[in-house]
C-alpha cells in the first residue's frame, strides 16, 4: 500500500488525481487482503505447529470465514479495478493472480520468488495506467530496481526458514539455506546501486531528491544487516521490515528524481 501511494505521488510529481488515487489504493488493498487471507487459510495447519501466535491458530479468527472473506476481497478488487479502466484492471488481475498462485503452491517450489517479482513488476504500470501519468523514462525503473523484488521475497521467507525446513517445504530459501539466502539477498540489495550508476549514462536525476533517498536506503540496509546478525525469528522479521522500507524508499526516490 505504501509503495502504491509512493509510486502514485512520485510519478505524478506530487499532484495525483485524488479520486483516482483513492480508487487505486482501495483496489490494491482489496487485492492484498485476498492474497493474505488466502495464505493464512492455506497455511492454517502449518501455522498451528510453527506460528501458533498468528490469528487463525491463536483462535482470534475462525478459519472457515477466510475463504468467504477472500472471495469478497477479490470481487471488490475487480470491481474497483474495472472502475479505473481496462488496462489498470488487467494489471491488477495479473498481480492478484500472481499472489494467489503463490498461496496455492508456488511457495513450496523453486520458483517461489516468481509471484512476488511478477506482482511488484505490474504494480508501477497499474498505478501509471490508473492515474494516467506514464512517462517513457519510468521504464528504467525495471533494470535499476528489479533485484529488489527478489530481495523482498528472500527477506520475507528468512524468518520462517526453520519452520519451513522442518515442514519439508521446498522454497528457494529452504533450498539455499540461511547463509546462501543471505548472500543472495546481499547481492540483490547491492545490485540497484550499481545499476543506478550505469543508468547515469542515459538519464539525468535531481540530485536533491536522489541523494537523500540513496542515503536512506543505505541506512536502512545497515540496520537490516545488524538485525540479521542477531539470532531468532523476531530479529529476522525486523530485518525484513527494514528491507521492505529501504526498497520502497529507493523505488519512490528514483521515480521522484527522474
Image (cartoon, rainbow, N blue to C red):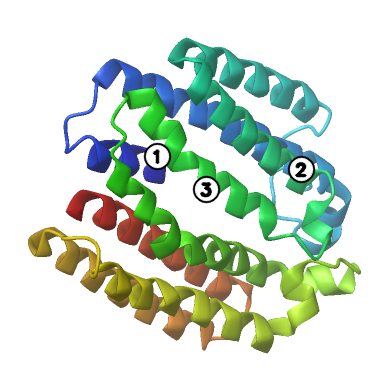
Q: Is residue 125 left or right of residue 228?
A: left
Q: Is residue 96 above or below residue 152?
A: above
The part of the image, by quadrant, that contains residue 167 is bottom right
What is the number of the mark on residue 4?
1
Crowd band around label 3 with a 10 angstrom C-alpha radius: few (<14), some (14–19), many (20+): some
The residue under the point 74% across, 59% down is 112
From the viewer's side, name the closer residue of 41 and 127.
Answer: 127
List x then y, in percent, for residue 53. 70, 55
Chain-order first, disc 3 or disc 1: 1
The residue where tag 2 is placed is 101
The residue where tag 3 is placed is 121
The residue under the point 18% across, 55% down is 257
Residue 59 in sight here: no
Residue 70 in sight here: yes
Is label 1 in a helix, a strand or a loop? Answer: helix
The residue under the point 85% across, 68% down is 170
Q: Is residue 96 left or right of residue 127?
A: right
Amino acid at each position: 500500500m505504501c509503495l502504491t501511494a509512493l509510486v502514485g505521488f512520485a510519478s505524478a510529481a506530487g499532484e495525483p488525481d485524488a479520486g483516482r488515487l483513492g480508487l487505486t489504493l482501495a483496489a490494491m488493498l482489496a487485492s492484498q487482503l485476498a492474497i493474505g487471507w488466502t495464505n493464512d487459510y492455506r497455511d492454517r495447519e502449518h501455522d498451528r505447529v510453527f506460528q501458533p501466535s498468528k490469528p487463525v491458530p491463536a483462535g482470534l479468527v475462525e478459519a472457515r470465514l477466510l475463504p468467504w472473506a477472500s472471495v469478497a476481497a477479490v470481487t471488490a478488487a475487480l470491481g474497483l479495478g474495472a472502475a479505473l479502466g481496462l488496462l489498470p484492471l488487467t494489471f491488477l488481475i495479473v498481480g492478484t493472480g500472481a499472489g494467489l498462485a503463490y498461496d496455492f503452491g508456488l511457495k513450496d517450489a523453486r520458483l517461489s520468488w516468481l509471484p512476488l517479482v511478477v506482482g511488484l513488476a505490474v504494480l508501477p504500470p497499474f498505478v501509471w495506467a490508473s492515474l494516467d501519468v506514464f512517462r517513457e523514462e519510468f521504464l528504467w525503473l525495471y533494470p535499476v530496481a528489479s533485484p529488489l523484488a527478489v530481495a523482498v521475497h528472500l527477506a520475507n521467507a528468512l524468518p520462517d526458514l526453520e519452520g519451513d525446513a522442518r515442514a519439508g517445504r521446498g522454497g528457494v530459501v529452504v533450498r539455499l539455506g540461511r547463509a546462501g539466502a543471505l548472500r543472495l539477498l546481499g547481492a540483490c540489495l547491492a545490485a540497484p546501486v550499481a545499476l543506478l550508476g550505469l543508468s547515469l549514462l542515459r538519464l539525468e536525476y535531481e540530485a536533491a531528491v536522489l541523494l537523500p533517498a540513496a542515503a536512506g536506503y543505505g541506512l536502512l540496509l545497515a540496520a537490516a544487516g545488524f538485525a540479521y546478525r542477531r539470532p531468532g525469528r523476531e530479529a529476522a522479521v525486523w530485518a525484513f521490515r527494514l528491507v521492505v522500507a529501504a526498497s520502497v524508499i529507493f523505488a519512490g526516490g528514483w521515480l521522484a528524481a527522474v
